[in-house]
Amino acid sequence: MSFAPGHISLTFAIWENEDDLSKGSTGIGLIVPQGVHCAIEKSKAKKNIVIRKGEEIEDLVTLKAVELLGFKDQGLVIYQRHDLPLGSGFGISGASALAACLELEKDIDKCVEASHKAEVEYNTGLGDVVAIAESIRNTSFPSVIVRETPGCYGKVTCKPIKEKFVVCISGLGRNTSDIISDKNWIEIINSAALGIQYNNINLRSAIKIGRLFTERTGLINENTSNMINKLPLDSVSSVAHLGTSIVATSDDIPRLVESLQEFGAVREY
């Protein structure tokens, strides 16, 4: 069984390119130690299918990634187990595609190419696969990830996290495609990302920068704003983009968890 962890985007800038492998994003994110587990078996059917919670589901990104890897219409039954929900800001679409590819092919570079290209084609992500892959190469979950240059072959650094932090899974999530394919949003996001420094990033500074980016872009709704406003004063927090969850850290983690429980499921890492 293969595993790909989730990725929280704290900041990002969108870099367009006609080549899907070169198109992508730069920015700061966090890898969490939960994500997607995948197992695959061969059936007598002609087409590949994805099974989650015992039911066949439509996962076009995973199926496309598997196809790009060279396994189109092989009768594969792709079983997924998600530790975190889709659409809440944890890069689960990219993690699902990458986990499936890693179950079929041990060359991680080939898996990253197929998964990144599938995500870009379906507008479900621009940098999650690249960030997740770097954490897998370093066997580092959780970690701070910095994507300094865009695309499948971009420069990425990974720094392990020793401090505790939490996420609160709240709201119904949002459709990433609605944002990253909209020209107005792209202009707002890229303007907000200008001037962000990637040097000496740690957990607290990454979340603080994420909060600044969130305020500059306006990528926050009433629910996430209420969550952040009710946190203890000594905490730092930001939105998990592009979702409706938040990530936060504090010197008093039990108090932080308590303040978030009314808003949704709280995970401590």
Image (cartoon, rainbow, N blue to C red):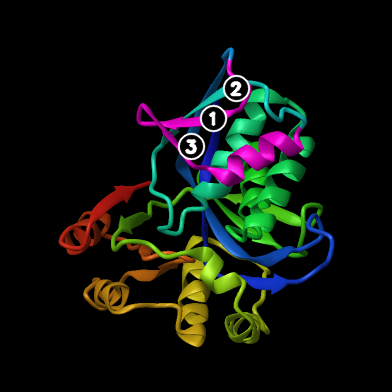
Characterize the local packing of mark 2: few (<14), some (14-19) or many (20 or more) Cα atoms within 10 angstroms. Answer: many
Of circles 1 and 3, which is in front? 1
Q: Earlier in the sequence, mark 1 or mark 3?
A: 3
Characterize the local packing of mark 3: few (<14), some (14-19) or many (20 or more) Cα atoms within 10 angstroms. Answer: many
Query: Dot 3 lies on which element?
Result: strand
What is the x, y in percent for residue 53? 35, 31
User: Which amino acid lies under the numbered mark 2 shown in the image of this protein?
Assistant: Leu
Q: Earlier in the sequence, mark 2 or mark 3?
A: 3
Which circle marks residue 149 in the picture? Answer: none
On screen, residue 187 above or below 211? below
The one nearer the camera, 242 or 234, is 242
Query: Dot 2 lies on which element?
Result: strand
Which circle marks residue 36 in the picture? Answer: 3
The one nearer the camera, 132 or 144, is 132
Residue under circle 1? 49
The one nearer the camera, 18 or 259, is 18
Residue under circle 2? 76
On screen, residue 61 above or below 111? below
Q: Earlier in the sequence, mark 2 or mark 1?
A: 1
Circles 2 and 3, Cβ within 8 Å, touching? The answer is: no
What is the x, y in percent for residue 255? 19, 60
**The magenta segment:** 45-69
User: Which amino acid lies under the numbered mark 3 shown in the image of this protein?
Assistant: Val
Magenta stretch: includes residue 65: yes
- The quadrant in which residue 114 appears is top right
Circles 1 and 3, Cβ within 8 Å, touching? The answer is: no
Which residue is at a point 29% across and 63% down the rendered structure image? 171
**The N terminus, quarter of image:** top right
Distance from Cα at disc 1 to Cα at disc 3: 16 Å
- The quadrant in which residue 144 appears is bottom right
What is the x, y in percent for residue 163? 43, 52
